[in-house]
Image (tube, helix red, strand yellow):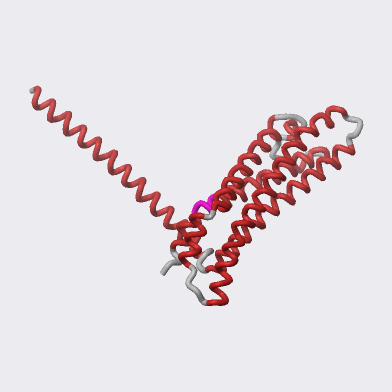
Amino acid sequence: TGAESQGTAQRENRSETGTIGRRTAARLRTRRIIMAYIEDIGFLAVGSPQKLLRTYHIFVATALASAVAFVGQIIIVLVFATMNVDNRRAWYSLFPQMAMLLAGFSLCTLEARILMLATIPCARIVWTFNNLGVRVADQLLAHARDDPHLTYGMRCAIMLAFWCFLNLLYEAFLPPCSKYNTLSFWDLDLAAFPCESWELVCSITALANATVAFCIMLLPRVVARLRP
């Protein structure tokens, strides 16, 4: 009886181990399929050196557009603050808002500068391809894998997306914007405009920079497909 129970326990353990192994294998296969699908989409977008350079330009344009959006939000906050010049509470709440917006603007300009420094070597490699007919797949792959500016740019994009998320939390839970938390924003008065525009700017900037960071992380795998 003891031998039979021991054998039954061993069979149950093997069955459970086999089930876990099959689940793990299924997860790995699903992950590989999803990553291959994403890489295929990336290769269609970055299927040549010229398209790769255009992608770098999009990265830089995203950072610059984010900086312009923060500048616009700073102007909006200052204009509405001057309209409430007699409201002391509004002026007190102005300082943390300006600090968060200026920090976001600084991150945007830093990210744009770093990505520009990453774009210059890529532009030189693409120039040799266009004008000299040199094979540049290995150079582009080495640049995508080893250029430190791409790594720093990805980190800046992640930091900026996280900073925008903190801005959204501040806007949602602290005054003066917390009182405007409603889905029917069209029913709000004009005083809510700075808060609603701040939420829009931070949401778009966070999504855009999270996408940039993910694309930079995926870039070496996609560029590797350019090799013959």
Query: Could you say which is closer to the camera, residue 150 or residue 188?
Result: 150
Write down the quadrant of residue 90 in the picture: top right
* Picture residue at 33% right of the left edge, 47% below the top: 26
Q: Residue at x 36, y 45 (%)?
A: 27
Q: Is residue 223 above or below residue 68?
A: below
Give the x, y percent position of residue 10.
16, 31
Q: Is residue 211 visible?
A: no
Q: Is residue 134 magenta?
A: no
92, above or below 104, in the image: above
Give the residue drawn at x 51%, y 51%: 217
Spot occupied by residue 68 in the image (x, y as percentages of width and height): 74, 51
The answer to which quarter of the image holds residue 196 is top right
Residue 106: tell me if it is visible: yes
- Residue 189 higher or lower than 54, as above or below: above
Q: Position of residue 39 (x, y in %)?
A: 46, 58
Most prominent secondary structure in the magenta stretch?
helix
Image quarter (top left, top right, bottom left or bottom right) of the N terminus: top left
In the shown orientation, is residue 41 left or right of residue 16?
right
Task: Decide if residue 107 is on the left or right side of residue 127.
Answer: right
On the rendered structure, is 127 left or right of 94?
left
**Magenta span of residues:** 214-218
Position of residue 98 measured from the top left corner of the image (x, y, whole percent): 77, 37
Q: Residue at x 20, y 32 (%)?
A: 12
